[in-house]
Amino acid sequence: MARWEPNARERLGRAALDLFVERGYEATTVAEIADRAGLTKSTFFRYYADKRDVLSAGQDVLMEAFGDAIRKAPAETTTVGCIALALDAAAAAFTPDRHDIAPKRRAVVAANSELQERELLKSALLTSTMAEALLERGVEKMTAQLAAELAILAFGITYARWSEPENQQPYADIARVVLGELQERAAALGADTFDSV
Amino acid sequence: MARWEPNARERLGRAALDLFVERGYEATTVAEIADRAGLTKSTFFRYYADKRDVLSAGQDVLMEAFGDAIRKAPAETTTVGCIALALDAAAAAFTPDRHDIAPKRRAVVAANSELQERELLKSALLTSTMAEALLERGVEKMTAQLAAELAILAFGITYARWSEPENQQPYADIARVVLGELQERAAALGADTFDSV
């Protein structure tokens, strides 16, 4: 049996990200990642399917967390309340010790068009996961679709503010503020007139 | 000099779509598309870069039309008014004689995961094109982002209703109704409370 390695998943993830930044995503091999983390290739493959998986695994976790939070919300929770709970669930992944990961991750993705496409597709999947979870609660279809778009915007804006170098606020606090700001915009767009056009 | 071929672009597009439906997207060649349209391969390449371009060319036209409509809207136009004008511009592409194309196109894309990814990416590009055009008008950033998401939703829902076999309404009329419906949802989401969560 394999030796138990404390925190192997996190160590591999950080080693991979550092190497992607230093050498580029394409040029980095799984062997190098394992080596940098002080682990073996076979340990790597216990946690990740391939090097791309290191970057997308977190999004899969998020997707499940978002969907679960919405499905398990009390029956009386409003639609925006469900989004707030989904963002609270995401906060578990955005702890202060992971703060330094965000700018590295952004730099790696920005340098590779295939990874950018992956991000967009994952974001579309996150959106439809939330829309479906809202539909399952009986939220009307167009409301569910628009709410899911609002949620994914809130998620992205919150992440950007949370990962700013000077930020000290916890993710969940920022998320509530952003959600409120987006609600203001939604109300204003709802009140816009355009018949005179 | 090449002989002038009436309506070659449209003929090639329709021939390609019919072949994609009959034989599958992967199995269809450019030579077969040209042959079905009664044209030559070199004529095909005057209009399209490759067979994938037949499916995405329309989206490029839309992207330009959306961006232009928003940029050229009178200064006093509201944000939702700009979206209405963008959808009006899209209506030029959705004339009654093109009604039969929608279900074929949908079937081809649904059968191919690479094409589905392309669609999602194009949709993300359409959204950011609209958000940027709104920003250029001086619309505040979060409003521009949310409005662009609302616009792309309105576009998709309008297209789905317009392409239903029994539909007789023009695209632009449906678009105005959908936009109003989405505004109602936006207003309701803006008014949701969630502090008690």
Image (cartoon, coloured by chain):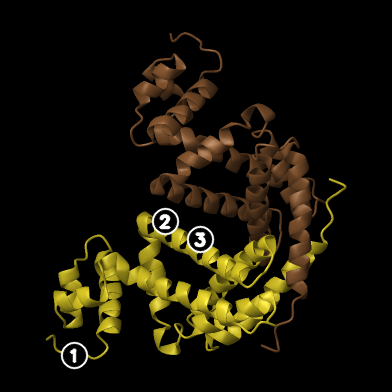
Chain colours: A yellow, B brown
Q: Is residue A34 above or below residue B66?
A: below
Relative vertical location of residue B104 with respect to residue A115 in this rendering, above or below: above
Identify the residue at horizontal 66%, vertical 80% (top origin): A81
For disc 3, the neighbor class at 10 Å (few under 14, some 14 to 19, many from 20) is some
> Which sits earlier in the primary sequence, circle 2 or circle 3?
2
Quick one: SS at disc 2? Answer: helix
Q: Quadrant of the N terminus of chain B?
A: top left
The residue depicted at 19 percent of the width and 66 percent of the height is: A29
Say left or right for A73 vs A109: right
Q: Report helix, strand or loop for mark 3.
A: helix
Q: Which residue is mark 1?
A: A4
Near mark 1 (Cα within 10 A), the count class, few <14, some 14-19 or many ≥20, is few
Give percent across and percent down for residue A196. Answer: 88, 47
- Per the model, the C-alpha gap separating discs 3 and 1 is 36 Å
Query: Pointer 2 indicates a residue of which chain?
Result: A
Check disc 2 and report the residue beneath it: A117
Quadrant including the C terminus of chain B:
bottom right
Residue under the point 43% across and 15% down: B39
Question: Which amino acid does the dot numbered 1 rest on?
Answer: Trp
Residue, x 49% and y 52% (percent of image)?
B120
Q: What's the amino acid at mark 2?
A: Glu
Q: Is residue B139 visible?
A: yes
